[in-house]
Amino acid sequence: MTGIACRSCGSRHLELVLSLGETPLANALLTEQQLTQPEARFPLDLAFCPECALVQITETVPPEQLFSHYLYFTSFAETMLRHAEQLAKRVIETRGLGRDSLVIELASNDGYLLQFYQQAGVPVLGIEPAANIAEAARKRGINTLTKFFGTEVAEELHREGTLADVVHANNVLAHVSDLNGFVAGIAKVLKPDGGRKLGRAIGCGLQAARRGKGGRPRPGRVLRRVRVPGAGAEG
């Protein structure tokens, strides 16, 4: 493939793995009135980067079009709620979190996870781009910013002194176009001894903190987690 840069290392030697043609957006459910109107479609091509081993799609849909109004509320899934409660309890215990701590979740949805930290007396901050879902979280008492997280938001929080003991990012990295900026932002909002918990990044070789020469990620294996510079791991 020519002319398309890898989302991680910038290489222009991507290899096409699978092409599914042009498809409509996921969760973009149509009303009856819209059925007779043209539906937006986008190329869905899967490519592999031999330089850093990242598997990625080649087309970037504007995130505002995908996530400004979102249909999926994580709290609908009881299994996710049980997992979130157990995870919060474990992290509180292992990291000794309390009233002087701060937990941030990126793409925090409706507060499904942060509510359990808050119930235990741990301050929280959610960052959620979907306005309808962020509003639902605020109605539950979860402090939530309606923004897309990246280096700009991370710089703002850093200047304000809003630094986290723990940053969660569950099932979000695969939706991010600027992978390196997103991970660099996590490092920016963590306290020096802070930890991060990322949802599994199955099928990618992104190693944002394992930098080789020239600041480019080294070729890597399939990863389950992305390591953040200077941050301890939360299993």
Image (cartoon, grey):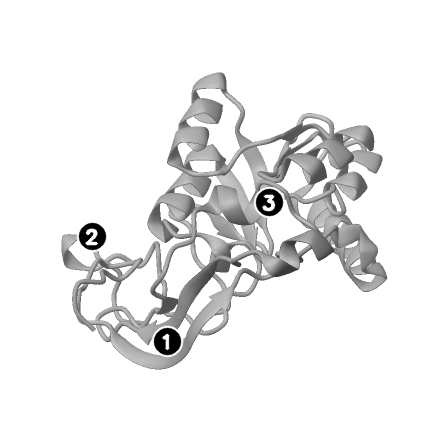
In the image, which disc is placed on residue 107? 3
Name the residue carrying label 2: 215
* Helix, strand or loop for disc 1: loop
Q: Is residue 90 above or below residue 136?
A: below
Residue 118 visible from this viewpoint: yes
Q: Residue furthest left?
A: 214
Name the residue carrying label 1: 221
- Disc 2 from disc 1: Cα separation: 18 Å
Q: Amino acid at mark 1?
A: Arg
Contact flag, marks 3 and 2 (Cβ < 8 Å): no
* Helix, strand or loop for disc 3: loop
Q: Amino acid at mark 3?
A: Ala
Residue count near mark 3 (Cα–Cα under 10 Å), binned few <14, some 14–19, many ≥20:
many
What percent of the width, then of the height, locates residue 132? Answer: 70, 37
Q: Residue at x 49, y 18 (%)?
A: 160
Residue count near mark 2 (Cα–Cα under 10 Å), binned few <14, some 14–19, many ≥20:
few
Front residue (pair 149, 24): 24
- Disc 1 from disc 3: Cα separation: 26 Å
Q: Residue at x 63, y 42 (%)?
A: 69
What percent of the width, then of the height, locates residue 51? Answer: 21, 71
- Disc 3 from disc 2: Cα separation: 27 Å
- Kindly report which numbered mark, 1 or 3, lies closer to the viewer in this rendering: 3
Report which quarter residue 187 is drawn in. top left
**Which one is earlier in the sequence, the residue at label 1 or at label 3?**
3
Contact flag, marks 2 and 1 (Cβ < 8 Å): no
